[in-house]
Amino acid sequence: TATVDRAVDALRRGDPILVHDAADREGEVDVVYPAGAVTPDAVARMRNDAGGLVCVALADAVAVAFDLPYVQDVIDHPAAADHDLGYDERSSFSFTVNHRDTYTGITDEDRALTITELAAAAAAPEETDFAGEFRAPGHVHVLRAAPDLLADRKGHTELAVALADAADLPPAMVVCEMLDDEGGAALSPAAARAYADREGLVYVEGSAVVERLG
Ligand code: 5RP
Ligand code: ZN
Ligand code: CA
């Protein structure tokens, strides 16, 4: 649909967009940025206006090139034996990283550096010494998209990477959930739409992305 095209254009310009997955899934709206466009101000917007976890979704092929596993597969602990999600078959979490040029890793500057360096790494995986550039654990969550993207899974991880592909951007996308400061819940789609209108951002439904790019 036209909204998906506007979302792709916004990402190409380096602007954030808002993506709602589905009412019968998480029912969450994530702020989504191309990782290469993230500045310290963008990290501040995510922690102040969104409030969720700041994550970088990488394409499966990039995760394979960097040997980044699903964390559930490598933690030898009973808590990881059965992930037991209510809304999907499995989580997309890999582990957390910091770029080696960060200090604590949590500041807006440090997280922006880790995120932009992940974008540069994803743009040229074969030229990247991942362990030479990043340390783990860190303060940016890496997510690993399903190999066939929306055909396999319809999470924000896959929605964001599919949008990156459509925009000809490196497959490294930041996602961060919008939370409600009052209700103790995820921000409702209606409230997220109002935020998008106020801020001049494109709001797009996951179902529209699946229809157009799936
Ligand atoms: C990480 C999450 C988010 O919901 C993020 O959107 C990735 O998950 P998914 O692909 O399952 O939607 O939980 O903070
Ligand atoms: Zn999500
Ligand atoms: Ca979530």
Image: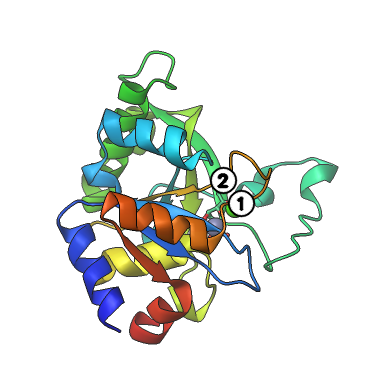
| Quadrant of the snapshot with the C terminus | bottom left
Instruction: Write down the quadrant of residue 76 in the picture.
Output: top right
Find out if the beta carbon at label 1 lies less than 8 Å from the nearest ligand 3 atom. Answer: yes
Mark 1 and mark 2 residues within 8 Å of each other at the beta carbon: yes
Mark 1, residue position: 186
| Distance between mark 1 and mark 2 Cα atoms | 4 Å
Determine whether the residue tagged by mark 2 lies in a helix, strand or loop: loop
Q: Residue shown at 38%/13% (left/top)?
A: 103
Could you tell whether 65 is left or right of 119 in the image? right
Find out if the beta carbon at label 2 lies less than 8 Å from the nearest ligand 3 atom. Answer: no
Q: Earlier in the sequence, mark 1 or mark 2?
A: 2
Toward the viewer: 138 or 6? Answer: 6
Where 184 falls versus 160 (above or below)?
above
Three-letter amino acid code at the position of disc 1: Ala
- Count of number-bearing discs: 2
Q: Quadrant of ligand 1?
A: bottom right
Toward the viewer: 175 or 46? Answer: 46
Residue 61 drawn at (x, y percent)? 38, 61
Residue 179 circle label: 2
